[in-house]
Image: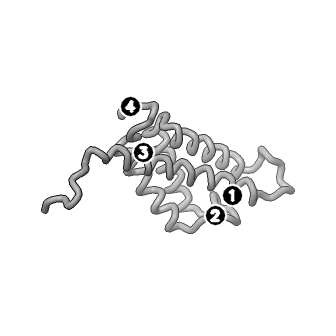
Amino acid sequence: MLNLFPIQFLAPFAYAILRVCVGFLFISLASRRIKSRNPSIRFFTNVSVYTAILELILGGFFIAGAYTQISALVAIALSILHILAPKKFGHTGAPSRIFFVLLLFVSLSIFITGAGVFAFDLPI
């Protein structure tokens, strides 16, 4: 069937929109994780803090478009960990498993298609 809107030259913009959206989602996850941490536990002895730092770095890489496909692999692994072990990696403000399933598939799409336009890296 023919495409009703044949504007395939805009596809790289769609990849860039997905990439930036995932970046902001990871930054939002990191800020939620830091806000909901237990203040009685020391800051750098908690697994949640290291995960928040990783999520902040991933969000920055996604927004900047640097190391996007490598970041997508790490995002896929984090999403799978959140789906399979929500008690270990979750926190009080954590989204549901459905959120991480969607994040898994968007990260998989970014891994396959690349960063899109306005990115620093080239596809591998």
Mark 3, Cα crowd under 10 Å, few <14 / some 14-19 / many 20+, is many
Residue 37, position as x, y percentages in the image: 76, 57
Position of residue 117 relative to residue 95, above or below, is above
Instruction: State left or right for residue 124 relative to residue 5.
Output: right
| Front one among 30 and 84 | 30
Say which residue label 2 marks.
94
| Front one among 25 and 1 | 1
User: Mark 1–mark 3 contact, CB under 8 Å?
Assistant: no
Secondary structure state at the residue bearing disc 2: loop
Residue 60, position as x, y percentages in the image: 58, 41
The residue sitting at 25% across, 48% down in the picture is: 8
The residue sitting at 44% across, 35% down in the picture is: 119
User: Mark 2–mark 1 contact, CB under 8 Å?
Assistant: yes
Mark 4, Cα crowd under 10 Å, few <14 / some 14-19 / many 20+, is some
Say which residue label 1 marks.
32
Q: What residue type is labelled 1?
A: Arg
Say which residue label 4 marks.
122
Say which residue label 3 marks.
16
Mark 2, Cα crowd under 10 Å, few <14 / some 14-19 / many 20+, is some
Q: Which amino acid does label 2 sit on?
A: Ala
Secondary structure state at the residue bearing disc 1: helix
Position of residue 71 relative to residue 28, above or below, is above
Q: Quadrant of the C terminus?
A: top left
Q: Tell me the distance, in whole angstroms, between the alpha carbons under discs 1 and 4.
A: 31 Å
Instruction: State left or right for residue 26 relative to residue 20.
Output: right
The residue mark sitting in front, 3 or 4, is 3
The residue mark sitting in front, 1 or 3, is 3
User: Mark 3–mark 4 contact, CB under 8 Å?
Assistant: no
User: Mark 2–mark 3 contact, CB under 8 Å?
Assistant: no
Q: Tell me the distance, in whole angstroms, between the alpha carbons under discs 1 and 3.
A: 24 Å
The residue mark sitting in front, 2 or 3, is 3
